[in-house]
């Protein structure tokens, strides 16, 4: 039967339906409840038939069945109430505590419900508003109200039968750090703008490993759903969480939660491949650089060891790269409402037991490669590691320092009182070092450009290219175990050109130092090691 026809039949016969309900009950709320149920069942039933010959008898039969079910439900409620009363008789001291606790628990479970469910439950049970009136107030059909009322009851029943939440055991995640691959928003917005609050971090984490509804997230976090809704709205709006099928939400950012097992496995793999680099590539690098031209490359006091520290770090980055990793990652970039376009990521180490690792983690801490450009030409490269005395912190970096050094080389600034502050900066950074009133530049400088240096360095042989691909696959197979399936494609792109990555490069430095191929640095050298400046003029 057509929906409009069915609706007209229900409306035209609602007086008969209400009269039937009134003949069975005197309580107005119960009458409205019964009438609403009958109207709903009649409407649903009419949709499944083509026509009805005797509509009054049809409605009466459905009304009788609905009322029978209603009476059965009432008897169950009475039995439940009687059991409670019996319990009260057995233990009066329990009653007030039990009722207060259960009421509090009920209110708590209601707070976990979604907005629509909360409104309907509150109006129906607490404000004593009938289903028909609720449908009028919310401008929704009676059937829709009944459907949501049923779902809300089911969620409450499930929640109340669960054990009490222990706040101490509830999810309470704090990101150790956040970052992004890509661009900021037009006003400088970035991932930290939207995930700097603990509640936002916990919502993102709760919906990370599997898609969840607002109610499920609220229960997971033990917080009212209204707080989840408010925060979730922003996270969805800016693309950090996606709304998926089933009215659920799934986090769309990379959350790195390493375990001791994963770190140990990856450490073993990185160390194995660093050894291969030391055996198959580094000796060629040393052979080439032993013949470096001082007219092209300046190294302080012609110290080949100091030069090789920087060249090894630089070459293993730029000459062992097979792909343009940025292009791999760009396909995962999210275009956000604030104008930014990036991959957001965060990392957590709450479950890690650093002291139980078989290796010293800080040997491999780095500040990623910093490249400065001027009119598309690189001016300097910097790589901070455990082996230097620079802080592994972006706040300690300033590209202006290299401009000052260039001004010194070209004579734009000289040691006068007018430039005292600038020279103090150069001395503090050890860009200039003075011995017995004689200064020298304490940095590797290449003339005239990066292209000159790259052409000098040995190329990656075919076997190393095969090894690089094998390493990517090994790391991916270990890494993917800690990420949900919808992040695996991003995880694979992330683990591209691992051979040229910081984890392998720092282990190469470690192994070369142990072998004696690289020697310990002086205090002054530790301030500027793994820095290469590209200049049109070299120090004298």
Image (cartoon, rainbow, N blue to C red):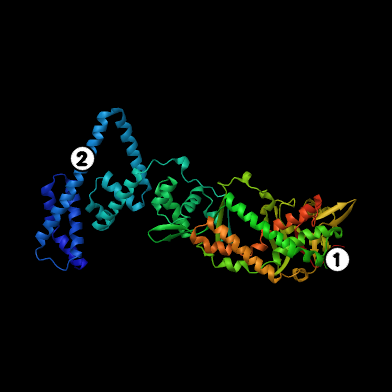
Q: Mark 1 falls on what kind of element?
A: loop
Q: Horizontal placement of 249 versus 427: left or right?
A: left
Task: Note whether 501 is above or below 89 in the view shown.
Answer: below
Q: Is residue 539 visible?
A: yes
**Residue appearing at x 46%, y 44% in the figure:** 170
Q: Kindly identify which residue carries mark 2.
A: 78
Q: Horizontal placement of 524 versus 145: left or right?
A: right
Numbered mark located on residue 294 in the image: 1
Quarter containing the N terminus: bottom left
Q: Mark 2 falls on what kind of element?
A: helix
Residue 54: name its quadrant: bottom left
Q: Nearer the viewer, residue 520 or 275?
A: 275
Residue 347 position in % (x across, y down): 57, 52
Quarter containing the C terminus: bottom right
Residue 370 position in % (x across, y down): 69, 60
Q: Looking at the image, tell me whether mark 1 or mark 2 is earlier in sequence order.
A: 2
**Residue appearing at x 52%, y 49% in the figure:** 197
Q: Is residue 495 visible?
A: no
Residue 198 position in % (x across, y down): 51, 48
Task: Note whether 273 is above or below 28 in the view shown.
Answer: below
Q: Horizontal placement of 451 versus 169: left or right?
A: right
Q: Nearer the viewer, mark 1 or mark 2?
A: 2
**Residue appearing at x 35%, y 52% in the figure:** 115
Give the distance between the C-alpha atoms of the residues marked 1 and 2, in whole angstroms.
Answer: 98 Å
């Amino acid at each position: 039967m057509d929906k409009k026809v069915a609706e007209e039949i229900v409306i035209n016969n609602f007086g008969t339906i209400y009269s039937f309900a009134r003949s069975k009950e005197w309580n107005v709320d119960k009458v409205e409840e019964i009438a609403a149920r009958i109207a709903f069942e009649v409407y649903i039933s009419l949709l499944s038939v083509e026509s009805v010959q005797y509509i009054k008898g049809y409605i009466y039969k459905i009304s009788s069945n609905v009322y029978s079910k209603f009476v059965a439900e009432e008897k169950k409620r009475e039995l439940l109430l009687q059991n409670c009363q019996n319990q009260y008789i057995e233990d009066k001291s329990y009653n007030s505590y039990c009722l207060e606790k259960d009421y509090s628990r009920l209110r708590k479970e209601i707070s976990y419900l979604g907005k629509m469910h909360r409104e309907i439950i509150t109006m129906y049970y607490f404000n004593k508003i009938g289903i028909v009136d609720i449908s009028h107030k919310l401008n929704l059909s009676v059937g829709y109200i009944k459907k949501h009322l049923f779902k809300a009851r089911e969620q409450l029943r499930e929640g109340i039968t669960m054990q009490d939440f222990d706040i101490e055991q509830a999810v309470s995640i704090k990101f150790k750090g956040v970052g992004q691959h890509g661009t900021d928003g037009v006003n400088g917005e970035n991932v930290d703008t939207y995930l700097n609050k603990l509640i936002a971090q916990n919502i993102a984490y709760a919906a990370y490993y599997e898609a969840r509804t607002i109610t499920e997230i609220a229960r997971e976090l033990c917080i009212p759903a209204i707080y989840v809704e408010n925060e979730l709205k922003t996270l969805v709006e800016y693309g950090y969480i996606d709304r998926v099928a089933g009215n659920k939400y799934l986090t769309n950012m990379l959350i790195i939660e390493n375990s001791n097992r994963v770190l140990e496995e990856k450490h073993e793999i990185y160390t194995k491949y660093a050894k291969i680099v030391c055996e198959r590539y580094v000796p060629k690098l040393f052979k080439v650089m032993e013949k470096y031209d001082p007219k092209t490359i300046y190294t302080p006091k012609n110290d080949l060891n100091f030069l090789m520290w920087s060249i090894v770090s630089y070459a293993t980055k730029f000459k062992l790269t097979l792909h343009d990793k940025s292009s791999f990652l760009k396909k995962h970039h999210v275009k956000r409402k604030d104008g930014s376009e990036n991959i957001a990521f965060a990392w957590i180490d709450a479950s890690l037991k650093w002291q139980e690792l078989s290796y010293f983690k800080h040997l491999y801490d780095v500040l990623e490669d910093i490249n400065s450009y001027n009119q598309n030409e690189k001016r300097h490269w910097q790589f901070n590691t455990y082996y230097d005395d620079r802080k592994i912190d972006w706040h300690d970096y300033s590209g202006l320092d290299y401009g000052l050094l260039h001004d010194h080389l070209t004579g734009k600034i000289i040691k006068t009182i007018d430039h005292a502050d600038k020279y103090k900066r150069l001395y503090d950074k050890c860009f200039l070092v003075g011995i017995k009133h004689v200064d020298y530049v304490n940095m590797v400088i290449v003339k005239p450009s990066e292209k000159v240096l790259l052409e000098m360095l040995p190329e990656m042989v075919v076997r190393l290219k095969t090894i690089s691909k094998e390493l990517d696959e090994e790391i991916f197979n270990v890494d993917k175990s800690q990420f949900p399936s919808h992040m695996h494609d991003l995880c694979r792109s992330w683990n591209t050109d691992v051979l040229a990555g910081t984890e392998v490069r720092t282990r190469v430095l470690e192994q070369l130092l142990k072998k004696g191929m690289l020697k310990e640095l002086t205090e002054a050298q530790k301030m500027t090691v793994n820095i290469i400046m590209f200049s049109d003029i070299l120090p004298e």
